[in-house]
Image: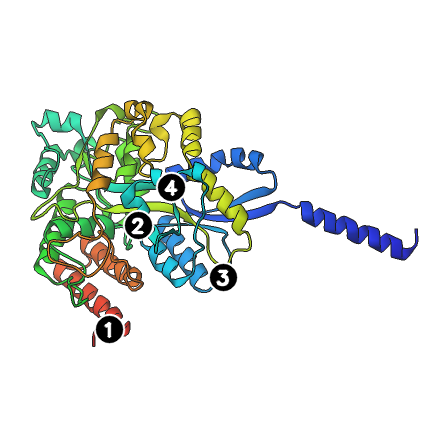
């Protein structure tokens, strides 16, 4: 064979090899239980789609937010699919940073729960598909409340929660009255904190977009939160996020926990939780109002505009957020383990309702949350525990750090709120909301 023929043959083989090479999808996700399960089940997707391989980048919540925000804003192109939420999706969709999703009739977009679907839609186009949805609610140890003679109504007040925490707090026996997030972050401690402040009659911005962190509801709400956690919370609360508290709760160390409804499927799982059969649920606590007392969120999968693998990415998202995927989890792990908060059909399934003792409370919390009317005074923003404007991310991080400082005793509540107000005011002036 002459050199020319040999080169032609080698080049031909190289081209053929390249054309047969699998498309690698790089997916950024959060290190939550349902996402870890999705990674284990990815083998089923790869078997059905041998031309696609999946590479996972799994990150802690705060790190994930930073990485995907930086990547999409700088058009870095690191990821083909991003795990994002109801804050990022409408903002990034409007900016053209995400590709609109397209589904065939079998996917059944109309089966998605209306509040969740609406939060991921811009101009009638879905820019991210919900992998799981959530609100927040009170989860408590009914064995401890019964022993203390405490009964909660469907939606207790924060004052009732505090009184219950005082009665069931028993640190000598390793039980703390209440566990709440303290780790700083707009999607971390600011979630429970903002819903608490909403219930005290507060808001993030007034109708002139002026931050309200030094208002009476914020002072009252944060004073209540800090006092509650110092008296009846576990040590080191300032470092606790969702996963740290989940571990504490499953070990039987938390009497109560106000957090994401998605936690219910883990704390009622006897394989994970020592107290699985002792858990009961109530709606997010109120004080002056029930408006904004429980948040609304979805962890969803979106396609950044910079990817070259749109078709493969759409195929994966369709699989991971479908009814078929929910049925696959049910088959592999049981109905109590399926990702919830996304589809009407899940809550209409008798097998799910039988297995998931939390289903009714979870759906009620999601249905009652209204991002368009989440504060007692009128507010200009969409969102319950966040304001869906680009500036909120920096504001939420700055204020969250101040709230952690107050909880850790490194700052007074007044000083922390003042510093948060100054930081927020600076961001809003810089963005031109007012002079």
Q: CA distance from mark 4 to mark 3?
A: 30 Å
- Indicate whether 2 appears above or below 40: below
Q: CA distance from mark 1 to mark 2?
A: 27 Å
- The x, y position of residue 122, in whole percent, is 34, 55
Q: Which residue is mark 3?
A: 76
Residue 109: which numbered mark, if any?
Answer: 4
Secondary structure under the numbered disc 3 in the rendered image: loop
- Indicate whether 135 appears above or below 328: below
Secondary structure under the numbered disc 4 in the rendered image: helix
State if disc 2 and disc 1 touch (CB < 8 Å): no
Q: CA distance from mark 3 to mark 1?
A: 29 Å
State if disc 4 and disc 1 touch (CB < 8 Å): no
Which one is earlier in the sequence, the residue at label 4 or at label 2? 4
Which one is earlier in the sequence, the residue at label 4 or at label 3? 3
- The x, y position of residue 217, in whole percent, is 10, 56
Residue 73: which numbered mark, if any?
Answer: none
Classed neighbour count for the residue bearing mark 2: other residues with Cα under 10 Å, few (<14), some (14–19), many (≥20): many
Judge whether residue 241 can be spotted in this image. Answer: no
Which residue reaches farthest right?
Answer: 1
Which one is earlier in the sequence, the residue at label 2 or at label 3? 3
Residue 429: which numbered mark, if any?
Answer: 1
Identity of the residue drawn at 37% across and 54% down: 65
Which one is earlier in the sequence, the residue at label 1 or at label 2? 2
Secondary structure under the numbered disc 2 in the rendered image: helix
Comparing 83 with 173, the one in front is 83
- The x, y position of residue 430, in whole percent, is 27, 73
Q: How many marks?
A: 4
Which one is earlier in the sequence, the residue at label 1 or at label 4? 4
Identity of the residue drawn at 56% across and 34% down: 48
Residue 119: which numbered mark, if any?
Answer: 2
């Amino acid at each position: 064979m002459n050199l020319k023929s040999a080169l032609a043959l080698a080049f031909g083989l190289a081209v053929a090899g390249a054309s047969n090479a699998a498309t690698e999808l790089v997916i950024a996700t959060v290190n939550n239980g349902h996402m870890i399960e999705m990674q284990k089940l990815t083998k089923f997707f790869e078997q059905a789609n041998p031309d696609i391989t999946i590479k996972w980048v799994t990150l802690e919540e705060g790190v994930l937010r930073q990485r995907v925000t930086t990547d999409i804003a700088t058009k870095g192109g690191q990821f083909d699919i991003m795990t994002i939420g109801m804050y990022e999706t409408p903002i990034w969709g409007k900016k053209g940073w995400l590709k609109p999703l397209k589904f065939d009739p079998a996917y059944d977009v109309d089966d998605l729960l209306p509040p969740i679907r609406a939060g991921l839609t811009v101009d009638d186009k879905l820019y991210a598909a919900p992998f799981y949805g959530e609100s927040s609610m009170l989860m408590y140890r009914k064995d401890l409340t019964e022993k203390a003679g405490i009964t909660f109504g469907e939606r207790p007040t924060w004052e009732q929660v505090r009184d219950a925490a005082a009665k069931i707090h028993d640190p000598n026996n390793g039980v703390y009255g209440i566990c709440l997030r303290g780790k700083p972050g707009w999607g971390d401690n600011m979630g429970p904190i903002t819903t608490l402040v909403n219930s005290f009659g507060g808001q993030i911005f007034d109708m002139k977009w002026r931050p309200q962190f030094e208002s009476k509801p914020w002072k009252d709400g944060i004073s209540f939160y800090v006092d509650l956690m110092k008296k009846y919370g576990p040590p080191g609360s300032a470092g606790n996020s969702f996963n740290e508290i989940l571990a504490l709760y499953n070990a039987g160390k938390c009497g109560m926990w106000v957090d994401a409804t998605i936690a219910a499927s883990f704390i009622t799982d006897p394989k994970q939780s020592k107290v699985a059969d002792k858990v009961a649920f109530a709606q997010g606590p109120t004080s002056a109002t029930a408006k904004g007392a429980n948040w609304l969120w979805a962890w969803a999968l979106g396609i950044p505009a910079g990817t070259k693998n749109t078709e493969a990415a759409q195929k994966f998202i369709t699989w991971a957020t479908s009814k078929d995927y929910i049925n696959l989890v049910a088959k592999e792990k049981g109905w109590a383990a399926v990702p919830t908060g996304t589809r009407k059909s899940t809550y209409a399934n008798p097998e799910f309702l039988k297995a998931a003792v939390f289903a009714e409370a979870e759906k009620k919390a999601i249905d009652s949350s209204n991002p368009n009317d989440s504060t007692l005074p009128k507010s200009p923003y969409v969102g319950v525990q966040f304001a869906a404007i680009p500036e909120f991310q920096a504001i939420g991080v700055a204020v969250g750090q101040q709230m952690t400082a107050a909880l850790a005793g490194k700052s007074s509540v007044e000083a922390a709120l003042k510093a948060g107000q100054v930081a927020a005011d600076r961001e809003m002036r810089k963005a031109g909301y007012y002079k």
